[in-house]
Amino acid sequence: MRRLITAGCLAGTSMMLATAAQADVPFFNATCPGPIEVHADEGGPIYVDGREARLKRFNGNYYEARSGSVTISLTIRPDGSPDVSYTAKGRANGVCRIKAAPGAGIESRAQGFDAPPQQRRSGRASMGSLPAFCRGEASAKFDVRPSEITTNMAFKTGNRIVVQGNYPDGQGTTFFNCWFDANGNFMSLN
């Protein structure tokens, strides 16, 4: 009898943990270059091109959803709105455009990262979406998965905007800066 109760408690606990892993996922619809359509119900799951993806929670603000060769990276901003990027086979990666999300009055610009850097522009992106855009630029330049890159909040310096970031390079940490003009258009990465 004691074993049955213990097994039942463990099963109940694991069910609560599985539910908690999806509890912070907000509702959103997004389009990624490719085109890849992404939909998330509030609390999960996340669908990629209409198929339910395997969802992994790293912390309360970061999730990855995998479906086939596509990985969707979901970051929850402090205001609760989603930041979405993707990676796919052939080193394809980029920032996804949010089409619908509660409280997301801004949209990040969908860009494929196979174009030369001077042709990739953030399209007057808001300050809140610049860290995700920078993460995509750094991923393409340094050949590092977006989920391994950390970017800080954007801030103004003079007549430009900068996003600072870093990633582990096996021997330590590599630091970089993404520079945007005053309108949020991508300029350079160094």
Image (cartoon, rainbow, N blue to C red):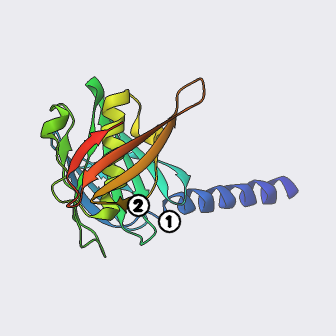
Q: Residue furthest left?
A: 119
Q: Quadrant of the C terminus?
A: top left
Residue 125 or residue 176, whichever sits in front: 176
Q: Quadrant of residue 33?
A: top left
Can see residue 49? Answer: no
Distance from label 1 to label 2 (Cα)? 7 Å
Q: Quadrant of residue 44?
A: bottom left
Q: Residue furthest right?
A: 2
| Residue that carries the numbered disc 2 in the rendered image | 44
Can see residue 168? Answer: yes
Q: Residues within 10 Å of mark 2 (few under 14, many from 20)?
A: some
**Amino acid type, label 1:** Ala
Give residue 120's mark: none
Q: Earlier in the sequence, mark 1 or mark 2?
A: 1
Please report the residue visible at 22 percent of the width from the left and 63 percent of the height from the top.
Answer: 107
Q: Is residue 70 above or below residue 13?
A: above
Q: Residues within 10 Å of mark 1 (few under 14, many from 20)?
A: some
Residue 11 or residue 42, whichever sits in front: 42
Q: List x then y, in percent, for residue 76.
A: 43, 61
Q: Quadrant of the N terminus?
A: bottom right
Q: Are marks 1 and 2 in contact (CB under 8 Å)?
A: yes
Please report the residue visible at 45 percent of the width from the left and 41 percent of the height from the top.
Answer: 147
Residue 132 or residue 187, whichever sits in front: 187
Q: Quadrant of residue 87?
A: top left
Q: Is residue 4 left or right of residue 56?
A: right
| Residue that carries the numbered disc 1 in the rendered image | 23
Q: List x then y, in percent, for residue 42.
A: 38, 68
Q: Is residue 131 above or below residue 120?
A: below
Identify the secondary structure beneath mark 2.
Answer: loop
Identify the secondary structure beneath mark 1.
Answer: loop
